[in-house]
Image (tube, rainbow, N blue to C red):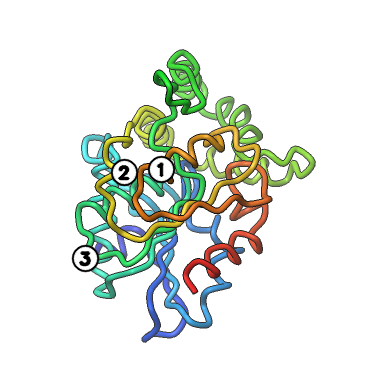
Amino acid sequence: MSACARHNLRAYGPERAHTIVFAHGYGCDQTMWRFVAPAFAADHRVVLFDLAGCGRAEPTLHDPVRHGSLAGHAEDLCDLIRDLGRGPVTFVGHSVSAMIGALAAIRAPELFDALVMVGPSPCYLNDGDYRGGFERADIEGLLDLLDGNHHAWAAQMAPVIMGNPERPELAAELEASFCRMEPGAARVFARVTFTSDCRADLPLLGVPTLILQSADDAVAPVEVGHWVAGQVRGSSLVHLGAKGHCPHVSAPEETARAIRAWLG
C-alpha cells in the first residue's frame, strides 16, 4: 500500500497546479480543514491527509515506536510527499503538525518551497525565560487524565483548546474528534505532542515560513509565536484577530486570507 493510501490522502483542484498540503493537529483529522482548503482549490492542487493513528489513516500504519517521536511523523510526511511525486510543495500545518512540517523540511528541504505554521509551539513546557504556557506538573496531570479516562480528558480539554466559549458547538466538534481516536494511539500522540522540545531545531529551518498567531490561545500563547519567529530566519509573523487555538475552524475566512496574502 502506498504512503498516500495509508494516510487516506485526498486531492482536488487543477492537476497541473502547484500543490498545497494541509495537516491537522492532535486528535483531529483532515476534515478540520474543510472551511479553509477549498479557498485554494481554484489555483492549487489541494492535498489533505490523516496523520498516523488519526482519522481514517490505515490503522496498521501507527507504530508506537516510530510514532513515539515527532521525527517518525516527519518521516511519514516526507514519504507521503515523495509518493505524491509533486514536490516541492507548500505545507500548512496546524499545532503539532507545524513542528512535524518543520522537522520534515529540515530533513528534506527539497520537498518544500514554503511552510505555514498555524498556532505552532516547539515546547509546551515553561523553561527558564522560555514560557511555553505549562508547568511540568500541568502536562503530567493532563497525560495522567488521558491515560485514565480518554473521554473525560476530551471533555475537559476541548473547550480550552478551541476557545470561543460563546460558540460551544466548536468545542463539541473537537471533543467528538478526540473521542474518535483510538485510545492507545491517543496516549502515544499526546505524550509526543506535549513533551517534545523542538526549540533547537528551528534555527536549522531554511524554508520561507509564515507563522499565524491567534489571540487568547491557551495552548500556544502569543509569546511562543514571537519566540518561534525569532528563531526561524526570514520568517513572517501575522497576528490574527481570531481567538483560540483553532483559527482554521473558528475563523476560516481570516485564516485563508492571511495564508493567501503571504503566498501571493
Give whichever of discs 3 and 2 has the lower sequence position. 3
- Residue 110 tag number: 3
For residue 8, which quarter of the picture? Answer: bottom left
Quote the CA–CA distance across marks 1 and 3.
23 Å
Q: Where does the image place residue 96, in percent across and percent down from the top left?
A: 42, 43
Q: Nearer the viewer, residue 127 or 102?
A: 127
Q: Dot 2 corresponds to which residue?
A: 202
Q: Is mark 1 on a helix, strand or loop?
A: helix
The residue depicted at 67 percent of the width and 55 percent of the height is 251
The residue depicted at 24 percent of the width and 44 percent of the height is 72
In the image, is 219 to the left or to the right of 108? right
Give whichever of discs 2 and 1 has the lower sequence position. 2
Q: What residue type is labelled 3?
A: Glu
The residue depicted at 43 percent of the width and 33 percent of the height is 183
Residues at marks 1 and 3 touching, judged by CB atoms closer than 8 Å: no
Q: Where does the image place residue 75, in percent across and percent down from the top left?
A: 22, 51
Q: Dot 1 corresponds to which residue?
A: 230
